[in-house]
Amino acid sequence: MLRMYLLQIWFNLSDPATEDAIYDSYAMRKFTGIDFMTEAVPDEATLCKFRHLLEENGLNKLFFDAINRVMVQTGHMMKGGTIVDATIINAPSSTKKRSQESRF
């Protein structure tokens, strides 16, 4: 749950988008350590409850301070990220190229 929360903050995702991202992204699934063969991804309501629990008790700040200390000590840096959804589609070849070839 904590790793899902971190992904949510780092990539500025809503609760439903975080759940979807775990299903869609192998990298995020691997980061969270979730194995689809043996366990399910926690749903958005569970993540929301966990996030509120952290925030109400001030634990979110403690976790981020600890994570930042470790990252600085190990020479890592976390910057905001963006998730890009790309779909490859078939497209016809350029008609411009065909018209140039027919002139020669």
Image (spheres, rainbow, N blue to C red):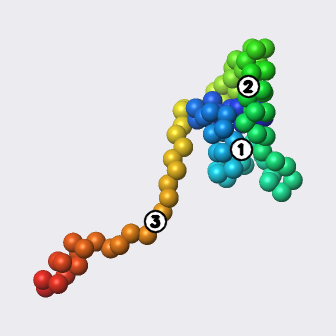
Q: Residue furthest left?
A: 103
What amino acid is at disc 2? Arg
Crowd tier of the residue under label 1, counting other residues whose Cα lies within 10 Å: few below 14, some 14–19, many 20 or above: few
Secondary structure beneath dot 1 equals helix
Q: Which residue in the structure is indicated by mark 3?
A: 89
Q: Which residue in the structure is indicated by mark 2?
A: 51
For the point 69% across and 42% down, which residue is it? 19
Secondary structure beneath dot 2 equals helix
Q: Return the mark for residue 3.
A: none
Up/down of 84 relative to 102, above or below: above
Q: Which residue in the structure is indicated by mark 1?
A: 31
Crowd tier of the residue under label 3, counting other residues whose Cα lies within 10 Å: few below 14, some 14–19, many 20 or above: few
Q: In which quadrant is the C terminus drawn? A: bottom left
Q: Which of marks 2 and 3 is nearer the N terminus?
A: 2
Given this view, does label 1 or label 2 mark the residue nearer the observer?
Answer: 2
Up/down of 96 relative to 74, above or below: below
Q: Residue furthest front?
A: 45
For the point 71% across and 44% down, which residue is it? 31
Q: Earlier in the sequence, mark 1 or mark 3?
A: 1
What amino acid is at disc 1? Phe
Disc 1 to disc 3, C-alpha distance: 29 Å
What amino acid is at disc 3? Ile
